[in-house]
Amino acid sequence: MYQWLDDRLSIGRLYAKAFRKAFPVHHSFFLGEITLFSFITLVLTGIFLTLNYEPSIRPVAGPLSDGKEVPAAYYSILYIDSLPFGAVLRSLHHWAAHIMIAAAFLHMLRIHLTGAYKNPRELNWMIGVFLLVFSILAAFTGYALPYDNYAFTATKIGYEIGAAAPWVGRLMSDILFAGELSLTNTQTIPRLYSIHVLWLPLALMGLIGAHLAIMIKQKHTQPRYAEKVAPGKIVGVPLFPQQAVMMGVLFLIYLAVATFIAGAFIAHPVQAFGPPTVATPAVKPDWYFMWIFGILQMIPATWRFEFLGATFGPQFWGGILVPTLIILGALAIPFLDYAKDKRRYLELPSQHPFRTSFVIGMLMFYLMTTLAGYKVDLQLTIGTLWMLVLAVPFLTGLAAYIILKAVYGKEWNQEAEGKQIGKGSAADD
């Protein structure tokens, strides 16, 4: 049977070419796989949710709502939670989204700190940026689907931010939300539902496929010490069976941990907020949106002017301009730090003090803007927030740079002298 299939499909050649690819064994490399595991979990739990969810706001009454009429989308969540393990699976879907965004962010952080975005991996870095952005967009479009008061209010904030884009914002928001987001718009939930369960998952699948295909084609980067073990080759274990077994074990561990979190911390109890009303509850976004929410808290309402019929206000500055500049900056990193020769080896963060201190400063920027999201709770003034957001990242990055120079400066000088001696010896020969 095997010989018959091999004659027609060349299974032996496929196994030798693809399934024997070497994978470096290093714990930081598993961050990308955890991102993939999260996406798989989201798809599997999402299938269960779609089979029991009605994307509609038509009035429905039943025992789960104590006979009161509520939107069908809201009633669907009550029904899902009433099913055996339904609330846990819905919670698992929620937390898997959080884990996916966190793992993707940490994965890109590792790539950035080790310089693994350089030639020839610029394209895969940019795909990674879009993967992170699309993952966050997928999480946002799922915000409204429970259709309780919290979900409606949080989604309304996102609608208003999108509508604040000059000239095209209102049109783009109306396309995304099927018109103005309101309690009477019957098309918004079906539109967001189709984007959430079809178009964004298809986009993510395409990006993940391209990301993996390019990675396999270009091969992994690896620590420089691997050159001493096997010069010119990738040091690791074959994809099958060794790497596949490790991935399988890691996936089971991931499922166990994620399911425990989902069961111990049931996500978003809709009964606590009730169906959407004209009242606006005090809401805060999830952590991956909190830094944008914090920036909005820092910008005074007076920062507003009109130009050629467009209004540039706080929502534009904090919700559109700053995130757009950060995304464009991330896409530009491989070209701002370009390497002419193709890089196969990971760079030590300690050997690149400016890049490492810049990353540390940016992390502090995210932390400080996230802190700004708690402006009311902590009773912080706008002046205090601006001082924290501007001063703390700069001072932290500067301190990191000085420490790196002081601790590793001698090693850099010795390495540079060694290279110069090597060049001199070659020239003498």
Image (tube, rainbow, N blue to C red):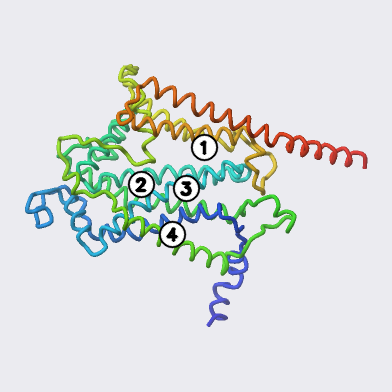
Q: How far is disc 2 from disc 4 in space, using C-alphas?
A: 21 Å
Residue drawn at x 33%, y 55% as measured from the top left: 93
What amino acid is at disc 1? Leu
> Which numbered disc, 2 or 4, marks the residue that appears first in the sequence?
2
Q: Secondary structure at mark 1?
A: helix
Answer with left or right where residue 341 lies relative to residue 243.
right
Q: Position of residue 28 (x, y in %)?
A: 55, 52
Q: Nearer the viewer, mark 4 or mark 1?
A: 4
Q: Which mark is residue 104?
A: 3
CB atoms at circles 3 and 2 under 8 Å apart? no
Closer to viewer: mark 2 or mark 4: 4
| Position of 417 relative to 313 (above/below) | below
Q: Considering only order in the chain, which callout, 1 or 4, is on the residue closer to the N terminus?
A: 4
Rounded to the nearest angstrom, the CA distance separating label 4 from label 3 is 15 Å
> Secondary structure beneath disc 2?
helix
Q: Nearer the viewer, mark 1 or mark 3?
A: 3
Q: Is residue 300 left or right of residue 221?
A: left
Q: Which mark is residue 331?
A: 1
- Spatial separation of the CA atoms under disc 4 and disc 1: 30 Å
Dot 4 corresponds to which residue? 254
The extreme bottom residue here reads 1
Residues under numbered marks 2 and 1 in contact, where contact means CB atoms less than 8 Å apart: no
Circle nearer the N terminus (2, 1): 2
